[in-house]
Image (cartoon, grey):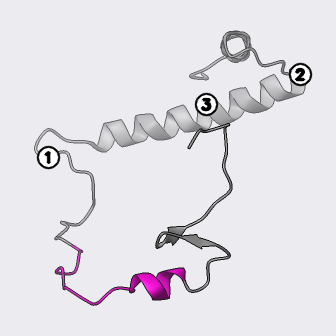
Amino acid sequence: MSAITRDEVAHLARLSRLALSDEELDHFAAQLDVIIGAVARVAEVAADDIPPSSHALPLTNVFRPDEVRPGLTPEKALSGAPAVEENRFRVPRILGEEE
């Protein structure tokens, strides 16, 4: 027996304001039935003695340690800018801002 019927898919489509053809309703009903079956199989495998986890393998911190490194000087950062003003990028005014 299907876990989800064509009528339930039509109801969900109406709630979602989706216009689905008869072929699409049949197609989505079959797909959703497969998905619900897969979730049910996973639920059967889950045991009370297995703690829930977000990953199959334990994770350790994958970040590298912070190192201080020299950055760009203002001159180098602004060297390729089309326009510079007061040691900053100059960009066109937007939204009618006042000075």
Q: Position of residue 34 (x, y in %)?
A: 60, 37
Question: The magenta stretch spans which residues?
Answer: 62-78
Estimate the spatial distance between the alpha carbons at disc 2 and disc 1, rounded to whole Å.
44 Å
Instruction: Write down the quadrant of residue 63 in the picture.
Output: bottom left
Q: Nearer the viewer, mark 3 or mark 1?
A: 1
Which residue is the site of mark 3?
33
* Callout 1 crowding tier (Cα within 10 Å): few <14, some 14–19, many ≥20: few
Instruction: Write down the quadrant of residue 3 in the picture.
Output: top right
Q: Nearer the viewer, mark 2 or mark 3?
A: 2
Residue extending furthest toward the front: 99
Asked if the residue at tag 1 contacts the one at tag 2, i.e. Cβ–Cβ closer than 8 Å, the answer is: no
Estimate the spatial distance between the alpha carbons at disc 3 and disc 1, rounded to whole Å.
28 Å
Q: Position of residue 75 (x, y in %)?
A: 46, 86
Q: Secondary structure at mark 1?
A: loop
Nearest the eye: 14 or 88: 88
Above or below residue 36? Residue 6 is above
> Which is nearer the N-term, disc 3 or disc 1?
3
User: Looking at the picture, which amino acid does disc 2 mark?
Assistant: Ser
* Callout 3 crowding tier (Cα within 10 Å): few <14, some 14–19, many ≥20: some
Above or below residue 43? Residue 71 is below
> Which is nearer the N-term, disc 2 or disc 1?
2
Which residue is the site of mark 1?
51
User: Looking at the picture, which amino acid does disc 3 mark?
Assistant: Asp
Instruction: Write down the quadrant of residue 97 in the picture.
Output: top right
Q: Is residue 73 magenta?
A: yes
Which residue is the site of mark 2?
21
> Which is nearer the N-term, disc 2 or disc 3?
2
Estimate the spatial distance between the alpha carbons at disc 2 and disc 3, rounded to whole Å.
18 Å
Q: Secondary structure at mark 2?
A: loop
Nearest the eye: 40 or 82: 82
Residue at the location (70% across, 32% down)?
A: 30
Left or right: residue 85 compared with residue 44: right
